[in-house]
Image: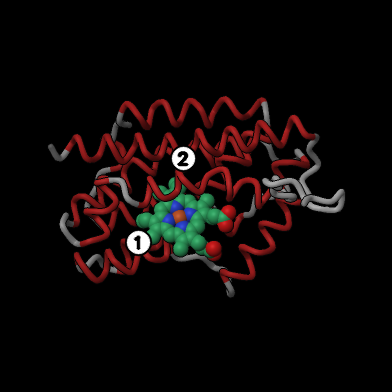
Amino acid sequence: MTSISDPPATVPPATVSARLRAATAVAHEQAESSPFIDDLMSGRLDVDAYAGLAQQLLFVYRALEDVGDRLAGDAVADAVRDEKLRRVPRLTADLAALGVDVDALTPSPAVAAYVSAIEATVADPARYVAHHYTRYLGDLSGGQVVAHRMRQHYGVDDAALTFYAFDIDKLKRYKDSYRDSLDALPLDADGVDRLVDEAIGAFGHNQALFADLAADRG
Ligand code: HEM
């Protein structure tokens, strides 16, 4: 028998961070188990595969950080923006260490679409936060495992893995406070819906990026 005090069968997560995590959980699993990532993480590829990923990520982070700079002063974007997260200089240095000429790179079709999606968020900071969350919180989480495996499987030098190193003392504490910032975003219900939808889309763009990298390798 149900009583009036029983919660409904499915309780929607109360906070923005919980909603984001729940809404992207399946997409996260798919990204983690996509053939390119699975092969890369299991040691079945080579250092060139890691370099290929880093090259494509350079376009993604240039867009993320360019839009982030343009949104400086916006209360929604400023809630998550942080100089400590800036990755373009590190990614550029990593690529140099890998012997890649960054001026000769072109984005894959999926990455070109990903970049356009990020650029469009300059008009909607709630959507910008979705891209920020998807990449940076991922780098602070699974990214740490990626760096470890690249060293372990392919002998990638630390000088080519600075992308995954953050000048942040306690990553867990930082991620907790990032989630607190998400939960305190000055957004109405519609803004939160747009954020969550865009995060699902951002995971899709990452999946498409991995599919391009897999296709490149035949
Ligand atoms: C290489 C494969 C991956 C592994 C091993 C991995 C692993 C993890 C782990 C263990 C966490 C939980 C960390 C925590 O709760 O503090 C996490 C969180 C996260 N990952 Fe991944 N991940 C991978 C790929 C990805 C990809 C491709 C993306 C998106 C581009 C991504 C985005 C995220 C995000 C946004 C979170 C934070 C979830 C939240 O707490 O709201 N991850 N990942």
Residue bearing the label numbered 1: 146
User: Count of labels shown?
Assistant: 2
Going 25% across and 43% down the picture, which residue do you hit? 101
- In the rendered view, does 76 fall on the left or right side of 100? right
> Eyeballing the image, is 83 above or below 189?
below
- Crowd class of label 2 (few under 14; some 14 to 19; many from 20; radius 10 Å): many
For numbered disc 2, what is the local secondary structure?
helix
Q: Does the beta carbon of the residue at mark 1 sit less than 8 Å from ligand 1?
A: yes
Where does the image place residue 122, in percent across and percent down from the top left? 63, 29
Going 70% across and 45% down the picture, which residue do you hit? 12
For numbered disc 1, what is the local secondary structure?
helix
- In the rendered view, does 131 fall on the left or right side of 19? left
Query: Which mark is first along the chain, 1 or 2?
Result: 1
Q: Residue furthest front?
A: 1
Q: Residue furthest right?
A: 4
Pick whichever, 21 or 133, lies toward us.
21
Going 35% across and 64% down the picture, which residue do you hit? 147
Q: Amino acid at mark 1?
A: Val
Where does the image place residue 26, in percent across and percent down from the top left? 46, 45
Residue bearing the label numbered 2: 203
Q: Is residue 89 visible?
A: no
Going 75% across and 38% down the picture, which residue do you hit? 74
Q: Amino acid at mark 2?
A: Phe
Query: Disc 2 versus disc 1: distance between alpha carbons?
Result: 17 Å
Q: Is residue 34 visible?
A: yes
Asked if the residue under mark 1 is in contact with the one under mark 2, i.e. CB atoms within 8 Å, the reply is no
Quadrant for residue 106, please give it: top left
Q: Does the beta carbon of the residue at mark 2 sit less than 8 Å from ligand 1?
A: yes
